[in-house]
Image: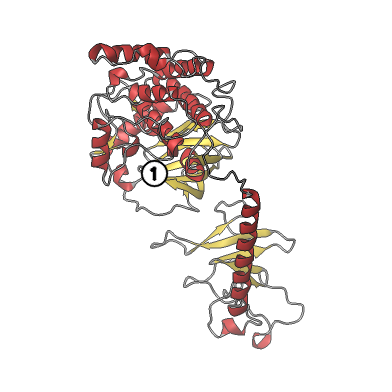
Amino acid sequence: MHKRGERSLLGEKIGPYFIKDRLGQGGMGAVYLAQDMALDRMVALKVLLPRLADDAEFIARFQREARASAKLNHPNIVQVYTVDVESDPPYLVMEYVAGQNLETHIRARKQLPWRDALNVVGQVASALDCAHRAGIIHRDIKPANVLVEKGGRIRVTDFGIAKIMGSETKLTATQHTVGSPCYMSPEQCGVGELVPASDLFSLGIMLYEMLTGSVPFKADTSIAVMRKITDEDVPPVSANVEGIPPTLDHLLQALTARDVTLRYDSATQVLEDLKSFQAGDTLHHFQSLSLQKAAHAPASASAADLTRSPTGTGVVLSDSLVEGLFEGTRSTVERPKPKRGIDVEIPWMGIFVTAALVLFAVLAMLYYKDRVENPPPRPPESPRDFREGRPPSQGAHGPWVFENSVWRLRDGRGGWLGEWRPNSNRGPGRPPWIWYAPQGQVAPPPDGVHPPRQDGPPPPPVAGPRGRRAPGDRPPLHPPGTPPPR
């Protein structure tokens, strides 16, 4: 089976994909930015961890469910292109989306305005509705798997680890459940069978985090978090966050009910109640769930009272829940002003600008002090440093430029003929250096260009008698320290 170690694959080629950059690390493997050499496009390449690649049962289910996910076609879903389980290591190829994930955005802003949070929920619910209609449960809805494009569109990714409805097997990795504990549904924690409403529970946890800046259930261990999910209810947010309509708690309650029968049945119901919330009408699906709950445990307030807007006329949202994210819309609910003994207006802008200027001045002083006390090393003035066995310095040596252990060959017209890179995949019979063309692909070197010595970066060449370059001599087109072709 697959025995490749967990290491970086930068600069290597897997199948028709040349890996250019590392995008992140997940529970199933690393995600890389790669170039599809056959179709000349950028893709996201998820490479499975070796411990998962060695599990034959996992690989079989992964391939079957990834192929089913590749059939999803929706503007809010990142497209799955292909999967190759025969490769070493196995990998999944997805559409590359330029932007940042929602987790990074929440971390930067702490909390999102409730209108923006509902825009995200609407777009994610639309993506889940498409997947659920196709018989696919995502099982790992969380901010890290929700991408925000620069134009504001939301894209749900990682459908490659989803579960096909009706499948008797569950996608697990050596008895470790796939998913993030803080966003798991009670069904994923062992209470009941996994259903589409399980994704909606995770969506509700994500909504809570967008509104408050943190997840509702925290503990020292994953087991403790899962126990809280099955034993405790998600607390309301309107009592703790200013400016949030209390009616929004009803939507959150219907998304995160521990009893799956009291939770939204489908993403379609979520979208319909969001539209009702936008129009200021009753949340009809939440009302029916409340009536069903009241039949088992009567409450002091009626379901109609629970679903009615606190103002009687409802809350008006933006024109469309999916028209775009973060367009500057803000809540129309006026926040109460804090009471002070003396009403004094504080010049926050002036304080901010002054603090920024002081910080800039301090950083500049530290920078120039460091430059004076620790000047950068001078490059060698002559090849004597290299003839005496000292290692090559960064910089130009004739037509060659040595940077970060790579020898790059200039073409004399401001461009590059290519470069020698150390071969990270050392082994018997494998060359220590690999020639890369300017386009970044492995290619045969030009005539007269020879690889460096095997024992490391060589010294620069010296032509002419007694090691001095004769006037008019052209630098040789081979790495320094190697003999010219005969």
Nearer to me, 41 or 340: 340
Image x and y of residue 386, in percent: 57, 81
Residue 234 appears left or right of 11: left
Image x and y of residue 5, in percent: 34, 53
Residue 319 appears left or right of 143: right
Residue depicted at 56% across the width and 63% down the height: 420
Image x and y of residue 429, in percent: 41, 62
Residue depicted at 51% across the width and 42% down the height: 109
Residue at the bottom extreme? 466
Q: Would you say residue 485 is visible in this rendering?
A: no
The quadrant of the image that shows the C terminus is: bottom right
Image x and y of residue 287, in percent: 37, 13
Residue 375 appears left or right of 230: right
> Type of residue at label 1?
Gly
- Rendered position, 469 above or below 295: below
Residue 234 appears left or right of 375: left
Residue marked by disc 1: 26
Nearer to me, 470 or 358: 358
Q: Would you say residue 80 is visible in this rendering?
A: yes
